[in-house]
Image (cartoon, grey):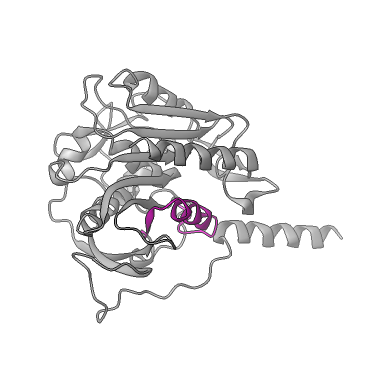
Amino acid sequence: MLEVIKLISVLLMFLIVTGCSNTKINPCSDETKVYSSINIEIDKKVCFKSIDSYDLNYNKKPEIIIYGNLIFPKIKKSEYDAVILSHGSGGLRKYHNSYVDLLTNNGYVVFQIDHYLNRGIKYDKTFSKVSGITFMNDAFRALNLIKTHPKIKKVAYIGWSQGGVGPILSHFKQATDLINNSKYLFDASVAIYPYCGFTFNEEAKTNNPLLILTGRSDDLTPEQACINIYDKFSTNENKIKHISLEGAKHGYDNPFLFFGFTFDKLPSLHIINDECTLTISKIGEIKTISNEKVKGPNESAKLLDKCSTKGVSVKYSPHATEKTYIEIIEFLKTI
């Protein structure tokens, strides 16, 4: 009986990690049209060019073709606002569909990016194969594309966990100036249980309104780093809103985590000091406050090892999930 229980536990863990996802077919083959502008009003997988860069220094960085799921509300309108979605280190998962439904049911066009498929990644349990800025680069290329649609006006940006790095950094002009000289900016950004281990000088100029949603019991990306960002920059035109969800753990909006699980080998990123806090240099490189550069996966893995301890727990929270849905829609209504 004990062996059966162990087998069931292993199967459940596999389902959690994979999200019950099926093998994906790459929609961006050589024959597929790569879009540089769009004017369609149908649901479609849209391939577009991004840049495959770990940081915001694009010197000698290659282009890459990736795709996003373009999804329109069922009720058509003369014009729309849109939201770009950026998944976390687990990749696109079925629980993200609830956000797609939430947004389209409220009249928003959704562009859901798959950062992983064309990079040959299924699930990054190391948190180092790509960076949160890799996701951010993709999101800004998607923004450039979405802004060409004649019916789309304002565009917001939502990201989870590692994908939440971009929404936070998009708030700071120092980062966006390096991307496209701030030619196109998101009108609002939302970070859901994000990694908040970045900072800038107190006088740093900011862009769009930013909503940060954190779990008070999150031990994978503990909320203290997000609180530090809020405390440091919330007086800057009151553009940052932070909501701490009592009792919520990492992945609180994923029903596959209903029973709660502990991962002994995943890092708890709770160490906050100059060696573990990141910023962006004037030429777009990632570096620590103590001036250690993070150029790629190897440096990132070393940093994670130094700035974390092992062992985290994750669990679904219906209350925190519902609160998140409500807060996102209310926040987007204000832009």
Would residue 188 be found to the left or right of residue 327 on screen? Answer: left
Question: Which quarter of the rendered picture does the C terminus lie within?
Answer: top left
Quarter-wise, where is residue 189 in the image? top left
Question: Which quarter of the rendered picture does the N terminus lie within?
Answer: bottom right
Q: Please tell me whether residue 24 belongs to the stretch shown in magenta.
A: no
Would residue 96 be found to the left or right of residue 45 on screen? Answer: right
Q: Residue at x 34, y 46 (%)?
A: 157
Would residue 186 be found to the left or right of residue 92 on screen? Answer: left
Decide if residue 271 is in sight here. no
Give the image location of residue 148, x and y in percent: 19, 58
Decide if residue 233 is in sight here. yes
Would residue 75 be found to the left or right of residue 316 on screen? Answer: left
Q: Please tell me whether residue 108 belongs to the stretch shown in magenta.
A: yes
The stretch of residues the image draws in magenta is 89-114
Quarter-wise, where is residue 229 in the image? top left
Q: Residue at x 32, y 27 (%)?
A: 239
Give the image location of residue 257, x and y in percent: 63, 50
Give the image location of residue 24, x and y in percent: 45, 72
As drawn, which residue projects farthest toward the front?
78
Given residues 213 and 202, the one toward you in this image is 213
Q: Residue at x 56, y 37 (%)?
A: 323
Given residues 196 and 126, the one toward you in this image is 196
* Number of dots carrying numbers: 0
Above or below, 26 relative to 50: below
Above or below, 321 relative to 96: above
Give the image location of residue 180, x and y in percent: 15, 46
